[in-house]
Image: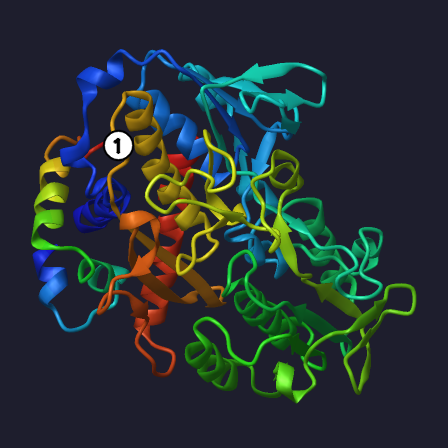
Amino acid sequence: MDAYKTEESGTTVMHRLARGYTDEDIALIAAYLTTQDINK
Amino acid sequence: MTHFALTRRHMLASIGAIGLGAAYAPAAFACVKARIAIVGGGFGGATAARSLKRLLPNADITLIESNKTYIACPFSNLVISGDRSLSAQLFSLDALAREGITVIQDSASGVASNGKAIHLTNGADIPFDRAILSPGIAMRWGAIDGYTEDAATAMPHAWKAGAQTARLRQQLHAMEDGGLVVMSIPAAPYRCPPGPYERASLIAHYLKTQKPKSKLMLLDAKDSFSKQPLFMESWQELYGDTLEWRSASNDGRVSRVDPSAMTIDTDFETFNASVANIIPPQKASAIAERTGVADATGWCPVDATSFESTLQSGIHIIGDASIAAPMPKSAFSANLQAKVCAIQVARLLSGLAPQPTTLSNTCYSYLSPDAAISIAGVYTNDKGAFASVAGAGGLSPAGPMSDIRHQEAREAADWFDTITRDAFG
């Protein structure tokens, strides 16, 4: 997410979305993702 | 499927949880045994039901939906152009029932005078402590002179997916080469702001490749529209003279239609259409008005933080029926509003105040069956009002057809799989 946020441009919507989230938001996403089974 | 794609999907899905992680109060939530009635089994209602079942495992959650199977609007423009089967748009609510949600196949006819029960058409009452309405849209029949519900047989709107979608597809398929296809596009607000222009792109692609002597005329009640620079650039590159767009100030606004003569009138011109797709002005579905949550605009004002009606306490409105601008009326918005609303309902039923969150939206639009563009936005909802986050969101990069467009078409397909699995299991 940090990479998406700082890259100037890119193909996906993630770059555009990531710029709307604070560092605290991104820390919350990271914490949430660690609770999820990525292979589900 | 690459590992990266999975990661990105999970990020997209989990963005809905942002701002909520710290707000979770699972211990208090487990004690809640309240009754929650949800009206509408689309992207908003189904997502709200599933989210609430996870948040409040001991609550009594009832979903009321008149159709046995939900038919999704996103991607239905590909059905109209012959590039996708309508069966790929069908989603059962059986998974919700298996998860312990009471699914009632009936339509809600109103709310009890005490404001604490939903009336069903079959006469039964569903009592609730809090209700969530995600009823979608209704057409404003007669807003365009001559465009009644009966007229939608000869001139389909196809703005609710299902029989109307199949009808417009069939009419295009049956049209002889050299015909004129006319689309009428309403002023804002309406469901899916870029949707008419995606549809125009895909119909133009069908005509150009299958019926090259035919033409598509877009008559618009607006002078500007979502993703306009990207659409217009691609129309010129891909479809040339096959497609023409008339803005409102260039006599584009349709004032009258005659379905038996297949004529469409603007202020100064009459078009004889081989196929006419009239997308009329819209409002919140009828249940909103009967529940007293729609205002004079026909849409439902809400407190942005909680999605609770500003007109009726205890009733929350999400999705297309709600007034949530600058969030667009989209499946993505409805899905995320449902998750946020579920958390706020759980908090209110636990004696906690609603908490501001961050919301987002992404809308993909196909330019041709293998190329797409997108628009994204990020929004806040503190102090009861919606606002766009400055510096975030925006459009796909401009420029001619490239791998970026093909990549976004693949991402759009991933998005559809992810959001439908999220909503319907």
The picture places residue B93, in percent across and down from the top left corner, at 51, 26
Q: Nearer the viewer, residue B130 or B336?
A: B130
Secondary-structure class at tag 1? loop
| Residue B408 appears left or right of B249 | left
Q: Which of B181 and B19 is in front in this view?
A: B19
The picture places residue B15, in percent across and down from the top left corner, at 24, 46
The picture places residue B140, in percent across and down from the top left corner, at 71, 55
Q: In this view, does B306 lie above or below B100?
A: below
Q: Identify which residue is drawn at 14% across, 61% down.
A: A4
The subunit carrying tag 1 is: B
| Residue B158 appears left or right of A2 | right
Mark 1 lies on residue: B353
The picture places residue B204, in percent across and down from the top left corner, at 60, 74
Q: Quadrant of residue B306?
A: top left
| Quadrant the C terminus of chain B occupies | top left
Q: Nearer the viewer, residue A29 or B209?
A: A29
**Looking at the picture, which amino acid does disc 1 mark?**
Ala
